[in-house]
Amino acid sequence: MKRRTFLQALVGLPAAISFVPSVEASHKPDHRITPLKLSEKEWKARLSDQQFYVLRDEGTERAFSSHLNDEKREGEYRCAGCDLALFTSDLKFDSGTGWPSFYTVIKGHIDTSTDFKLIYPRTEYHCVRCGGHQGHVFNDGPQPTGERWCNNGVALRFVPKEQI
Ligand SMILES: [Zn+2]
C-alpha cells in the first residue's frame, strides 16, 4: 500500500489531501528577494483586521466571501502585505471551492511549510518577501501541474493588466 493511501485509510482523509511534499520540494523560494520585516504594530497599521488575521495569524477567510472568486480580467494577483506578484491571471481557474484558485505560482515568489493545525499535515504557503500566509496547496488541481493553490482572496490585491 502506498504511504499516502495508508495514511488516508488511517485517519479518514478525503481524497484531496493538502500535504504535498513534492510541491514543497519543487517550489523553492528565490532568496534574492529582500525580505520585508515589520513589527506586529506596523503590520496592524498597514493591514485591515481581516488581512492581518489571514496574513499574519494564518487565518482562513469564509468561503465565497472574496470578490476575487469572480475576477476574470487579465492582470496580476499581488500579496496584500507587500505587493509582490504571486500569480498571474492565466494561472487562475474556477475550482468551485469558494476561494481564488491557481494551478501554479510565479516561480520563486512563494515558500511552503508543513502545518499541523488540523492534526494531519498540510502544505501551507506564504509570500517569500513578507512571509504573509496566503493559503494551502492541494493535489487535486487541473493539468499541467495537478496542483490547486487555494488562496485567501483578502491576502491578495488584483492589478488589472492596464495598470501594471
Ligand atoms: Zn508579501
Image (cartoon, grey):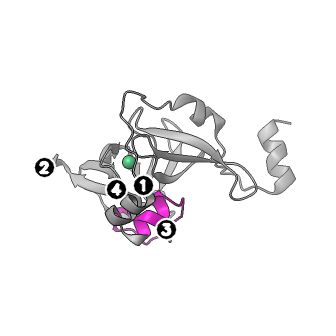
- Write down the quadrant of residue 2 in the picture: top right
Residue density around tag 4, few if under 14, some if 14–19, many if 20 or more, within 10 Å: many
Q: Is residue 90 magenta?
A: no
Residue linked to disc 3: 61
Marked residue nearer the N-terminal end (1 or 4)? 1
Q: Is residue 6 above or below residue 32?
A: below
Residue marked by disc 1: 39
Q: Which residues are magenta?
A: 50-68
Please tell me whether residue 20 is drawn above or below residue 15 in the rendered image.
above
Label 2, residues with CA under 10 Å away: few <14, some 14-19, many ≥20: few
- Give residue 115's position: percent from left, percent from top: 65, 50
Gap in angstroms between the C-alphas marked 1 and 4: 16 Å
Q: Position of residue 94 (x, y in %)?
A: 43, 57
Neighbours of disc 3 within 10 Å: few (<14), some (14-19), many (20+): many
Q: Which residue is mark 4?
A: 80
Q: Amino acid at mark 2?
A: Glu
- Mark 4 element type: loop
Measure how far apart labels 3 and 1 are at the Cα level: 23 Å
Q: Quadrant of residue 66?
A: bottom left
Asked if residue 99 lies left or right of residue 113, the reply is left
Cα distance between the residues tagged 2 and 3 = 28 Å
